[in-house]
């Protein structure tokens, strides 16, 4: 082999790799742009839901992109529906709790339901668990915490896909409202941005992999009842709880 042959072969391999990778990268960027365009029309609903449940709007956008790619009529193999991919039974509960309409595919109500569910899961399982719980359901995630039984591959991949998107929305106006769980259920369903506290702490969205206690967030959601005017009052406390 001549002295120039090896460098020439390397150059040809690198060039061929660029030829293959460039169209692939372009396709990925185009697909990402299409998803962003599909989600954009619902920004007003996203802002409303983010204010109502005091979570970052970027979280809602991220879930829509990963869950449904902005497809209003999306239905998963397991039956989850709409932009935020809510299971029909879960939507029925959220509908009653938050006075939503009967069509789970309705963009406004589906986004509101998804935002409410995100907030409930965050209050219940904290930053490290709410993404996984949103995907796999609170009962299955409770089992994971109690027994250490691994979460499904689908859920682990879901968390891995969402974590980078959610981590970008943790400070400033995008930070989740601080304080005791369920303060967002108080006198108003809307929380102004000025009431939120920012945090410089990097959030970890990785689920717990071993059994842990539930002092952090085992919130008794049934003890909070929505009033017709949109306010919440607390019923008599459950025996044994403060």
Image (spheres, rainbow, N blue to C red):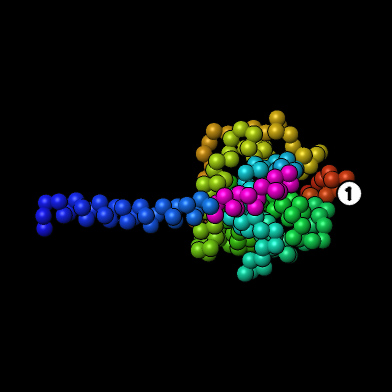
- Residue 167 magenta: no
- Residue at x 35% of width, y 52% of height: 18
Where 195 sits versus 93, above or below? above
Residue 153 in picture, x, y percent from top left: 50, 63
Start-end of magenta stretch: 31-46
Task: Give the residue pinned by disc 1.
Answer: 228
Q: Quadrant of residue 85?
A: bottom right
Where 51 sits versus 131, above or below? above
Residue 61 appearing in the image: yes
- Residue at x 63% of width, y 49% of height: 37
Quadrant of the image containing the C terminus: top right
Residue 122 appearing in the image: no
Mainly helix, strand or loop, the magenta region? helix
SS at badge 1: loop
User: How many residues crowd mark 1 within 10 Å: few (<14), some (14–19), many (20+)?
Assistant: few
Residue 106 in picture, x, y percent from top left: 77, 57
Residue 38 as seen in the image, left or right of residue 238: left
- Residue at x 55% of width, y 41% of height: 168
- Residue at x 74% of width, y 47% of height: 45
Residue 130 in picture, x, y percent from top left: 61, 51
Residue reaching furthest left? 2
Q: Quadrant of residue 5?
A: bottom left
Quadrant of the image containing the N terminus: bottom left
Residue 35 as seen in the image, left or right of residue 232: left
Residue 117 in picture, x, y percent from top left: 69, 53
Residue reaching furthest top? 194
């Amino acid at each position: 082999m001549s002295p120039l042959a090896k460098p020439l072969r390397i150059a040809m391999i690198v060039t061929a790799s660029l030829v293959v990778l460039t169209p692939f990268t372009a396709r990925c960027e185009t697909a990402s742009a299409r998803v962003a365009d599909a989600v954009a029309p619902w920004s007003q609903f996203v802002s409303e839901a983010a204010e109502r449940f005091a979570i970052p709007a970027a979280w809602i956008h991220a879930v829509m992109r990963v869950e449904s790619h902005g497809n209003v009529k999306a239905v998963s193999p397991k039956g989850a529906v709409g932009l935020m991919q809510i299971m029909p039974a879960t939507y029925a509960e959220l509908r009653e709790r938050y006075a939503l309409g009967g069509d789970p595919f309705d963009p406004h109500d589906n986004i509101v339901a998804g935002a409410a569910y995100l907030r409930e899961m965050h209050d219940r399982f904290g930053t490290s668990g709410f993404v996984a719980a949103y995907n796999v359901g609170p009962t299955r995630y409770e089992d994971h915490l109690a027994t250490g039984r691994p979460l499904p591959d689908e859920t682990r991949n879901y968390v891995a896909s969402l974590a980078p998107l959610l981590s970008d929305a943790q400070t400033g106006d995008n930070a989740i409202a601080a304080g005791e769980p369920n303060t967002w259920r108080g006198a108003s369903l809307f929380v102004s941005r000025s009431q939120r506290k920012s945090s410089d702490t990097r959030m970890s969205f990785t689920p717990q992999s071993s059994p842990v206690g539930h002092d952090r967030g085992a919130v008794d959601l049934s003890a909070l009842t929505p009033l017709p005017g949109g306010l919440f009052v607390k019923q008599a406390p459950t025996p044994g709880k403060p």
